[in-house]
Image: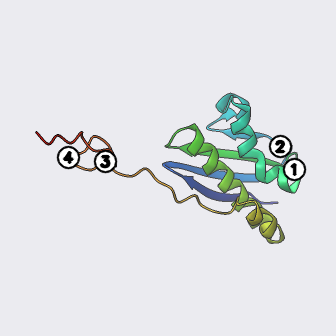
Amino acid sequence: MEVINALGRRKAAVARIFVSEGTGQITINKRDISVYFPSPILQYVVKQPLNKLGVVEKYDIKVNLDGGGFNGQAGALRLAIARALVKINPEDKPALKADGFMTRDPREVERKKPGQPKARKRFQFSKR
C-alpha cells in the first residue's frame, strides 16, 4: 500500500498526515502521541475515527501539526485521519459522517473591534 496523505484544520491548527500500513504508531512532529498529547482525553479524540472503524493497530500515521492550541490541534488531526481513512476505503464514509468526524468545524475566533476591549464586550457606558 502506498502512503496516503490528508489535511485537517480546526480553529488555527493545520494537520498534514501521511498514513501507511503498519502497527498503529502515531508520530506527531517526530514525537510519539503520548508525549505530544499527554492528556488521555486528547489522545482519545485523535483516535476516535480509528476506534470507530476498529483499525487502531492497522496503520502508521506520521503527522505535521502546526498552529493553534492543543484542542484545535487534536480536532484538526481527527479530521485529517477521518479523511485519510475515507481515501483508503470510501465505504467507511457514512459511518464516519454519522459521528461527525468528516465535518470541518467552522467556528473561528471573532476579531477584536476598535473601541471595544474584546470582540463583543463593550466598555462600561457612563451617562454622566
- Kindly identify the amino acid type of the residue bearing the numbered disc 1: Lys
Residue kind at label 4, given as amino acid type: Gly
Tag 1 or tag 3, which sits nearer the N-term?
1
Please give the residue where the numbered disc 2 appears in the rendered image. 24
In the image, taking residue 100 as reference, residue 112 lies left or right, namely left
- Circle number at residue 58: 1
Side of 68 relative to 110 (left or right): right
Q: Secondary structure at mark 3?
A: loop
Q: Residues within 10 Å of mark 4 (few under 14, many from 20)?
A: few
Q: Residues within 10 Å of mark 1 (few under 14, many from 20)?
A: some
Q: Residues within 10 Å of mark 2 (few under 14, many from 20)?
A: some
- The spot of residue 46 in percent (x, y) is 71, 45
Identify which residue is drawn at 14% across, 42% down.
Answer: 127
Cα distance in 3D space between marks 3 and 4: 9 Å
Residue 101, percent across and down? 70, 58
> With respect to residue 108, does 103 lie above or below?
below
| Mark in front: 3 vs 1 | 3
- Crowd tier of the residue under label 3, counting other residues whose Cα lies within 10 Å: few below 14, some 14–19, many 20 or above: few
Q: CA distance from mark 4 to mark 2?
A: 51 Å
Q: Nearer the viewer, mark 4 or mark 2?
A: 4
Q: Residue 115 has which mark?
A: 4
Rounded to the nearest angstrom, the CA distance separating label 2 from label 3 is 42 Å
- Return the x and y of residue 114 as percentages of the image width and height: 22, 48
Label 2–label 1 contact, CB within 8 A: yes
Q: Residue at x 34, y 49 (%)?
A: 120
Q: Nearer the viewer, residue 10 or 117?
A: 117
Q: Residue at x 65, y 39 (%)?
A: 28
Residue 112's tag is 3
